[in-house]
Structures are given as C-alpha cells and as structure tokens.
Amino acid sequence: MLVQTHFPRKLAPKRYDQYLASGWFRGSVMLYKVDLLCIESGIFGVVNIRLSLGQFELKKSQRKRLKRSDKKFSFSIGTAKPDAEKEALYAMHKQRFKGFIHPTLNEYLTSGFHRTVFDTREVCVYDGDKLVAVSYFDIGERSMASLIGLQHPEYKKYGLGIYTMLKEVEWGQSAGFKWYYPGYVLDLPSDFDYKLSLGNFEYYTPTKRWGSFQNFDPDLTTGHRVRKAMSALKEGLNGLGIPFIERYYPFFSLGYMAPWQLEFLTMPHFFELAEAEGRRLIVGYEPLTQEFRILDVGETDQFSHLVRMDHSAGYENEGEHLMEMLQVRRTVMSHAQCEPLMSHLVSKGWGRPPGMP
C-alpha cells in the first residue's frame, strides 16, 4: 500500500516506538505511512530517516553553532502549549512552505481536539522577550519524533531550525532516548535535505529494514518508478502526435485513506486527453498496481469537506493542477506496458499510426 493511515484512540509509548520503527510518522492526530508525494509540479519518493542518539557526536561546526546561539538566545523545553505568538510563527512558516499544510498550528498538532494520544514537547527560543523560534517533538518509550520547526524569517541567518533540532537531540540524549526520527527527505534534492546535515542517518529501505543512508539508491524508490513510467508515456503520446494537457493531482493519496464507497483516482500525475462537462479522459500510471491506465474520471464534491488543508502558491496554476477530488467512472484500459495503450488510442482515432509522418 502506497498510503496507510491510522487514527489511534490509545497509544502506549512502546507502541509509538514500533510505529516509528516501521516507517510511520505522525500527522496531526493520525499516523501515516506514505511512499509517494506530489509537491507542486513534481512527483517524489518519500525516504524516512532516523538518527542513533547513542552514536551521535557533535561536529565541530555544530558545537560552534550551539555555543554561538546559546550565547545570543535563551531557550526552554517543556510540554507543548500553542499560543498566539507560536501561531504567528506558524503563519509565517506557511507562506514559505511548499505543499499542503494545516491552517493553524493548533490544527497541525491536535486537529482541534482538546487532547491527543501523543506526548508532545516544544523547544522555545527567545531573543530577550521575543519568541523567535519554536519546534515540536513527540516522545515514545525510547524514541522521539521531531514534527516541525518554526523560525522568524528575520532570524534566518542564525539557522534556528538546525539549532532547535540540535536542542532536541541534546535533550533526547540526556533523557536516555535511543532514536531520533526527524520525518523524511525526498528521493531528489529538496528543501528537506537540511536534515541530513545533522549526522549519520539511517533510512527505511524498500525491503522494510533500516540501513545506512550512505547506501541510499534513488533509483529504487516509488518516485523514480513513477517518473520513469510517465516519461515513457509522454514520449509515446508525443511520438503519435496525440495532444494532451499535463496534470498533477495532489489529492491522489485520499483514494487510499478509507474504504470509500466510490473509487477515487490514485494517480498523482497524468495526461488529460479530453474534457467535457466535468468528465475527463486521462492516461497515466497507477503506482500501486504498476499499470498504465486509460480512465474516465469525473469531479465530485461529495467528500470535499474532508480536505481541510491549505496549500502553497505553486498549486494555484489551474492549467497544471487539479484541486478537486476525482472519481473513477470507468477504466477504459489497463496494461503493464504503455505500448498497448498507444495502439488502443490510435485504433480509436487518436493521433497517427506509427511510421506515418
């Protein structure tokens, strides 16, 4: 399964450790496991990482950063308590964030519930009386999971995002924790890569084991497989002169998240061949079944109220992104190879036969 979710009513610290060690991560009040993300105009594989606190030693540059920042700023670590100051930092963070994000910090941490099953702590950094950075992390029995770091943009030069991570690690080591999980990076270079500067990470491999990140191979990710398949599909359509509109569909993951009565589209990237009255004929690659598909899909607002996330400005290009939930009305054709789909389209009058100028 490319996307899995779980909404725990109870969560013992040891059980949380087990989820983290199995490639799960926390998002608001749910735990999720995802192999693929659609971020603006890109498809990426998700690579979960973790740091051994028992083996972690500060680099010389990190010791200097801590010493310099400890001298300029004060900090505190305690139970998470979102307030207006922290919400203001979150609002600034949203303006820079790429992807989908909860409307408020309180929504991010609790989805509006008074209490959650997670034991969440915060690192607050102050310049005098002014809150300039805050980060949040959960704790289990022997593991801790870093959730999010926020910093005032006027203090960007101080690298307070790294500083709060180092403070989390420092706290975890002193408290005797074994593992530090800072979420994930992507299988291509991205803004998430700052995490890797922290130390020698392990990553959750496609074989569901942890291995040294030095051995990470981006060609083995789901993201690479999808990008390669879509490149072959585009080449086939262009070679036959079949016109299309390239689309990205960031809501693809919702199709995996519940036993819907309707079949929702689960392809994050596809080519639209025709559109009329809310119905679209599309061709793309289904990453779960590893098949190329021609589908008849239609918009539905039946479950649109479940999409309670804000998105970055990169999704506002209506010619490229579809921001409505799409229901699969009919599967026209599916095959493990893209060539049979091309032949089918030509037989139906799309494009030109191979070899015809």
Image (spheres, rainbow, N blue to C red):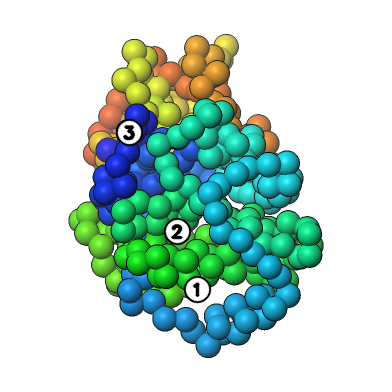
Q: Position of residue 3 (x, y in %)?
A: 35, 38
- Can you tell which quarter of the image residue 262 is in? top left
Q: Decide if residue 202 is on the left or right side of residue 131.
A: left
Query: Does 334 appear above or below 149?
Result: above
Q: Using the numbered discs, state the Cα–Cα distance from disc 2 to disc 1 in whole angstroms.
A: 12 Å
- Tag 1 secondary structure: helix
Query: Does 257 appear above or below 1?
Result: above
Q: Earlier in the sequence, mark 3 or mark 2?
A: 3
Query: Marks 3 and 1: CB-CB under 8 Å?
Result: no
- Residue at 64 percent across and 34 percent down: it is 103
Q: How would you rate the neighbour count of disc 1 (Cα within 10 Å): few for under 14, some for 14-19, many for 20 or more?
A: few
Amino acid type, mark 1: Ser
Depth check, front residue: 167 or 222: 167
Depth check, front residue: 326 or 116: 116
User: Outermost residue, bottom direction?
Assistant: 60
- Residue at 51 percent across and 22 percent down: it is 306
Q: Decide if residue 289 is on the left or right side of residue 128.
A: left
Q: Decide if residue 174 is on the left or right side of residue 67.
A: left
- Residue at 35 percent across and 29 percent down: it is 9
- Residue hosting label 2: 182
Q: Decide if residue 212 is on the left or right side of residue 350.
A: left
Q: How would you rate the neighbour count of disc 2 (Cα within 10 Å): few for under 14, some for 14-19, many for 20 or more?
A: many
Q: Position of residue 313 (x, y in %)?
A: 69, 42
Q: Using the numbered discs, state the Cα–Cα distance from disc 3 to disc 1 in whole angstroms.
A: 34 Å
Amino acid type, mark 2: Pro
Q: Earlier in the sequence, mark 3 or mark 1?
A: 3
Depth check, front residue: 34 or 111: 111
- Residue hosting label 3: 10
Q: Position of residue 80 (x, y in %)?
A: 55, 47
- Residue hosting label 1: 197
- Is residue 228 in sight in this rendering? no
Depth check, front residue: 269 or 169: 169
